[in-house]
């Protein structure tokens, strides 16, 4: 069996715009619906959503037949959890709250097999290796894993230039909500100072070999940050889409009871 290729890593390398959605419903069934919707990438969120390796696996399997790139966000930097996500077949990880070179370098070691890293070898048990069905999986796995680190604090921004030098980090994703909180503007990711900080960070990232990404909730902000070099942009989340659609439908009847 051939090594599964990481198309998302390739797209990031070529700076091809990738539009994505955060997925927090933690359901394989709704994941399959989203996989047919036309996004370039879907992020299965294990940071704020109630996911674990078993529920992430079910979602990876549900989306596998469709042409969409899958990204997994672990809850923390734990190398053991990262190993599990890689073994169940996640090829791209987006890791939250990276603030220093040492944290970024430790993540690079966590995703790589020795001698370049410390990922444990268990290919016969790993879906990623098609249970040893992929010839030479261990020899080529490092090339197909994509590591994106999230910068989302003042400390992370202060160390951005140094983190940009860490070999093995493929992209940097800015988290506006946590960044705003860290800058003293909790709940205001669109605050002018936060926006300027994001613009500056995206510009600096895009000037390097690493891809720049950001989360937005309004299409005009996607366009705005695209202008500063963002090439992979998450434009919303499934939980918000569902709630907003439900609230709009319910309120259309509450506001116009005469329609019934
Ligand atoms: C944030 O905004 O803090 C995120 O992690 C997601 O974009
Ligand atoms: Mg965040």
Image: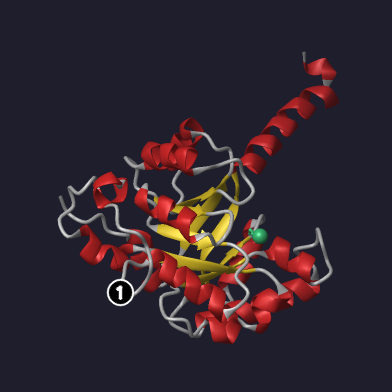
Q: Quadrant of the C terminus?
A: top right
Seen at 83% across and 23% down, the residue is: 254
Between 96 and 253, the one nearer to me in the picture: 96
Indicate the position of residue 178 as horizontal and vertical percent values.
71, 63
The residue lying toward the viewer, choosing from 256 and 26, is 26
Q: Which of the two residues, 175 or 223, is positioned nearer the viewer here?
A: 175
Q: Is residue 83 left or right of residue 244?
A: left
Quarter-wise, where is residue 114 in the image? bottom left
Location of residue 147 with respect to 156 vertically, above or below: above
Place of residue 201 in the rendered image (x, y in percent of width and height, measured from the top left) = 62, 79
Specify how the rendered protein is coloured: secondary structure
Estimate how packed mark 1 is, as few (under 14), some (14 to 19) or many (20 or more) residues with alpha carbons within 10 Å: few
Query: Can residue 36 be spotted in the picture?
Result: no
- List x then y, in percent, for residue 225: 61, 70
Residue 258's place in the image compared with 147, above or below, is above
* Coordinates of residue 176 in the picture (x, y in percent): 69, 65
For mark 1, what is the residue?
115
Q: Residue at x 79, y 75 (%)?
A: 193
Quadrant in which ligand 1 is drawn: bottom right
Please, what secondary structure does the residue beneath circle 1 have?
loop
Q: Is residue 14 left or right of residue 26?
A: left
């Amino acid at each position: 069996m051939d090594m599964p290729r990481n198309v998302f890593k390739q797209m990031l390398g070529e700076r091809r715009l990738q539009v994505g959605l955060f997925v927090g419903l933690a359901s394989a069934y709704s994941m399959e619906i989203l996989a047919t919707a036309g996004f370039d990438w879907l992020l299965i969120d294990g940071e704020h959503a109630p996911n674990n390796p078993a529920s992430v696996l079910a979602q990876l399997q549900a989306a596998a037949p469709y042409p969409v790139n899958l990204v997994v966000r672990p809850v923390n930097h734990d190398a053991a959890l990262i190993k599990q996500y890689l073994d169940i077949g996640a090829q791209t990880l987006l890791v939250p709250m990276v603030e220093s070179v040492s944290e970024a370098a430790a993540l690079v070691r966590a995703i790589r097999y020795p001698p370049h890293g410390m990922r444990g070898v268990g290919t016969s048990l790993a879906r990623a290796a098609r249970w040893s069905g992929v010839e030479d999986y261990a020899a080529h796995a490092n090339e197909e894993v994509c590591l994106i680190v999230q910068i989302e604090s003042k400390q992370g921004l202060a160390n951005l230039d140094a983190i940009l030098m860490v070999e093995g980090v493929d992209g940097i994703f800015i988290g506006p909500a946590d960044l705003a909180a860290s800058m003293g503007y909790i709940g205001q990711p669109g605050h002018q100072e936060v926006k300027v900080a994001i613009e500056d960070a995206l510009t600096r990232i895009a000037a390097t070999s690493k891809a720049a990404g950001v989360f937005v909730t309004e299409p005009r902000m996607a366009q705005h940050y695209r202008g500063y070099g963002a090439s992979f942009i998450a434009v919303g989340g499934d939980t918000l889409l569902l709630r907003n659609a439900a609230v709009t439908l319910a309120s259309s009847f509450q506001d116009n009871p005469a329609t019934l």
